[in-house]
Amino acid sequence: MNSTLNASIGNEYNQPDRTLQDIPVRKTQNGLIGAVFRARNTKQDGQVELLSGWSGWSRDSALVYDTKSQAKEVEKLDLETGEIQGFKVDYKGVKKSSRDSKEARDDRFSLQTTSRSVLGRDWRVSKCNRCMYHMDLPGGKKLPKNYAGVMRGEQGGAFFGGLVQCGSVWTCPVCGSKIAERRAKDMREAMVNAKSRGLYVSLVTQTVKHGVGDDISELLPKLAKAQTSFWGRRAVKDLFEQYGTVGRVRSLETTYGSAGWHPHVHLLIFSESPLPKKAQDVLARQWQRSCLSAGLPKPTIKNGLDIRNGEAAGEYVCKFADDSKLVKTAKGEDVTWDAADEMTKANAKKGRQGNITPFDMLRVIRDPETTENQKNFYRARFEEYARAFKGRRQLVWSRGLRDELGLGQDKTDEEIVNEMNNESNVIALLNSEEMSAVSRKELRSTVLSLSESGGITAIATLLHSLVDTKSSLTDYIAHMSARLLRPEFGVKSVNCNSCGTHHVSRLESPVCPLCGHKNKKEDLDDGNDA
């Protein structure tokens, strides 16, 4: 490593405690301007390991890109938009952008804002992760009134507590993602348990014939009626009984394309024997009759109903980045979408054959290069979709199937988005002024990312530049830290029974920091609550 680079690293990177508060921040009426960078090394290079953890933040991008083989991971924080972008740096110092979980979260919050702008203030998505409510925490604790909590889950991911969650899989990318992940986890567990019991899983897809002038609010009731008719037919019942069907899971979704709305249903069929290909012809003809009885056009045998092995469903859908790689294509490549994701992540998928999902519509509307006429067109389509799907269930398990597969009682979408386990910790408390500023400048995702990487100090540093405060940054950080010293979180301001010293103590281990006396909780003399 050359001496010039050594010097620059010595001035910047060898300061592990360097945080955003050390970076001179330029401000205008529109807020923060510019970007800051940090890096870390994940691999030793000979005798030298430049960065054992994340470096401090720096305005000098050369410190990131000129470190060659030393900086393996890089983060760039845009102080104006709040976006955090991840990079990988190869041995030649070339940066390669990669969509990581933080970038995906940025995208979800941004799409939620777009959905809010399209649907207006009367929809719950407009209040989601913005408006406060008094929230119960695990263990009988509560978030204090008029505060939102930045929480850390057992897996290390950050999220907000004490804010309204709309729980809509149809209109909210933030709630929809959490619900989809939980539902996909259940589906994967169900498929594993089914395999251990010797059951087979088949993916059945049912579509209806549609045209560009069809109204989605009229198609959906007819699709539901066709479903009822299909499962009530004797030929259908006999066929599924023949193969020892244990139960089914139904998922509803739609896309939009040149032929208009394309609503369709995915079904996971759990059976004692696999559904053979010859069953497709029988079921497809029954589906044709069901569509006609519901007032729908007659679909073709080829396109109306499709049967696939559940583990091969990844080849049926358009691939979208995900954590499951259970199957391979004919070329031996990993397919990053399994049957569970096909069922539960409808709005995350890219539409096939030119079709787009409703959340793709939000991306089109958000794109600054989209013409106003195109934006207006897709705004109208998204509103149609939202009204038509409001109140409908995306995923439905047949009666008794969850118990049969050892999954227990199902949870509603609202229960999933509000669930919190005993391992969740409060990282920071934001008052109404701070939360309002974060929401107004669309920095909600940034706050969560900063909490994961820099804790309460990083959050306080950002907030200090946003709110009207006369406090110094040091005092502001101390003030935010002191908010966590509350009885609700097992902390009290007490007087030692031995030496009389007044101090802050955690109730589970009330040891005096001065004399070392271990006070009994029941014998503590309360001071003023912290």
Image: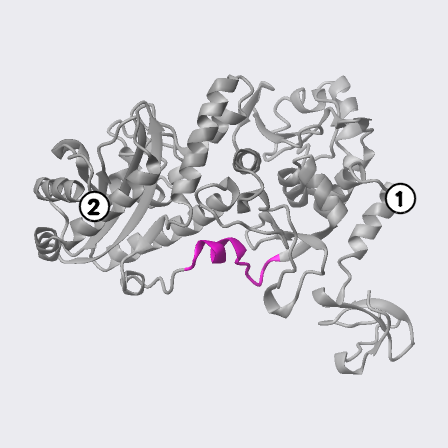
The secondary structure type at the circle numbered 2 is: helix
| Pick the front one: 91 or 193 | 193
At 32% from the left and 22% from the top, the residue drawn is: 258
Quadrant that contains the N terminus? top right
Seen in the picture, residue 278 relative to 380 is either above or below; the reply is below
**Which range is magenta?**
411-424
Of marks 2 and 1, the one in the foreground: 2
Instruction: Determine which of the numbered discs, if any, sits on residue 518 in the image.
Output: none
Q: Can residue 61 be seen in this view?
A: yes
Image quadrant of residue 451?
top right
Q: Position of residue 290 (x, y in %)?
A: 15, 44
Q: How crowded is mark 1: few (under 14 residues within 10 Å), some or many (20 or more)?
A: few
Q: Which of marks 2 and 1 is nearer the N terminus?
A: 2
Q: Is residue 360 visible?
A: no
Q: Where is residue 278 in the image (x, y as percent from the top left)?
A: 7, 41
**Amino acid type, mark 2:** Ala
Quadrant that contains the C terminus? bottom right
The residue labelled by disc 2 is 226
Q: Is residue 416 left or right of residue 425?
A: left
Image quadrant of residue 453?
top right
At 67% from the left and 56% from the top, the residue drawn is: 426
Q: Residues within 10 Å of mark 2 (few under 14, many from 20)?
A: many
Q: Where is residue 4 in the image (x, y as percent from the top left)?
A: 77, 18
Q: Is residue 258 left or right of residue 237?
A: right
At 34% from the left and 36% from the top, the residue drawn is: 216
| Pick the front one: 313 or 160 | 160
Q: Which residue lies furthest to the bottom in this view?
A: 523
The residue labelled by disc 1 is 471
The secondary structure type at the circle numbered 1 is: loop
**Amino acid type, mark 1:** Ser
